[in-house]
Amino acid sequence: MTGLSGLIRRDSKMFFKDKGMFFTSLITPIILLVLYATFLADVYKESFAANLPAGFNLPEGLIDGFVGSQLFSSLLAVSCVTVTFCSNMLMVQDKVSGARFDLTVSPVKSSTMALGYYISSVLTTLIVCYGATGVCFLYLSKVGWYLSAADVIKVLADVFLLVLFGTAISSVINFFLSSQGQISAVGTIVSAGYGFICGAYMPISQFGEGLQKVLSFLPGTYGTALIRNHAMNGVFREMSEIGFPSEVIEGIRDSIDCNIYFFEDNVSIGAMYAILGGAIALLILAYVLLNVFVRKKSN
């Protein structure tokens, strides 16, 4: 444990010491929030209005709260994964600088070194993402706050799980990279594409039936659905209290991916947690085994 804790401290210090890496990770969610609020708010509002039955009118504050919660959940669903590719750059930088070679010739086990990178990246990403979550809560308090204390706790738990998931993905991918150019290219691709395939930018329900079935196999889809459910619980409760029919509410939940269907079967919240947790465990195991295998092969 002493070796692992030492590696975690070393990797975390290296992350915060690199001001470019740290500020890039920190500012990314804020930029996304501004872009989402500027460009996606009207799209979400129009989509919401289109799903309302004729004659139904909602208070403006509730509509703003609905749109704000959807933006909030989309931002965190993307940031918790994409930020990990910034915080996990140290793994590649150590290869470029030769520091990785110095670590591999030490008595530290490959599995311990791999977990050191992973845990350090999780901790640094959590600092950034929980900071972004705080900013999102402030934004939501301005446009329309309907979250209960339980909803807030669940959102924070979802952020934690998504960071574990994102770090596991970035660890497996970054393991095969060996230059700054490669990590920059991969980071750009992930930042541009992940929001679409996880349903953050556009609900999966608006895609074609074939693509919906393909995306239902991806764990990130369920991570987005979890945080969206918990971010929007309060809005749906308010709708019920003011007399919205349950059928209308379910139709809205379907349209924004609060309800995810796997070949016509509605996936429960518990099943979503199980899928995301299983994906995290498998990815971490694959990452550790990759490090152990390469170490043995090089020896």
Image (spheres, helix red, strand yellow):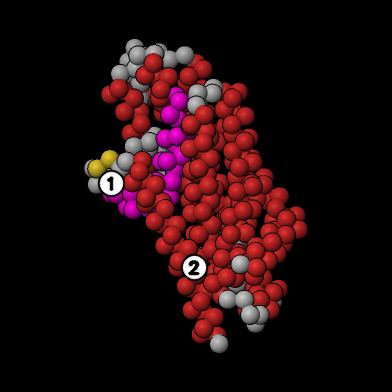
Amino acid type of the residue tagged 2 in the rendering: Tyr
Whether residue 38 appears in this view of the structure is no
Residue drawn at 62 percent across, 76 percent down: 108
Residue 261 horizontal side relative to residue 19, left or right: left
| Residue matched to label 2 | 287
Q: What type of secondary structure mainly makes up the magenta span?
A: helix
User: Residue 186 appears at what percent x and percent y?
Assistant: 55, 61
Q: Quadrant of the C terminus?
A: bottom right
Q: Earlier in the sequence, mark 2 or mark 1?
A: 1
SS at circle 2: helix
Name the residue nearer the viewer: 176 or 51: 176
Q: Is residue 88 magenta?
A: no
Place of residue 204 in the rendered image (x, y in percent of width and height, measured from the top left): 37, 42
Q: Horizontally, is 299 left or right of 7 in the view? A: left
The residue positioned 59% from the left and 34% from the top of the image is 136
Q: Nearer the viewer, mark 2 or mark 1?
A: 2
- 222 left or right, relative to 132: left
Residue 202's x, y, as percent?
Answer: 43, 40
The kind of secondary structure element at disc 1 is strand
208 is within the stretch colored magenta: yes
Cα gap from disc 2 to disc 1, whole angstroms? 28 Å
Residue 186's place in the image compared with 199, above or below, is below
- At label 2, counting other C-alpha atoms closer than 10 Å, the crowd grade (few under 14, some 14-19, many 20 or more) is many
Q: Is residue 124 visible?
A: yes
The furthest residue to the bottom: 299
Give, as a single range, the part of the protein colored magenta.
207-235
| Disc number placed over residue 262 in the picture, else none | 1
Q: Is residue 248 above or below residue 291?
A: above
- The type of residue carrying mark 1 is Phe
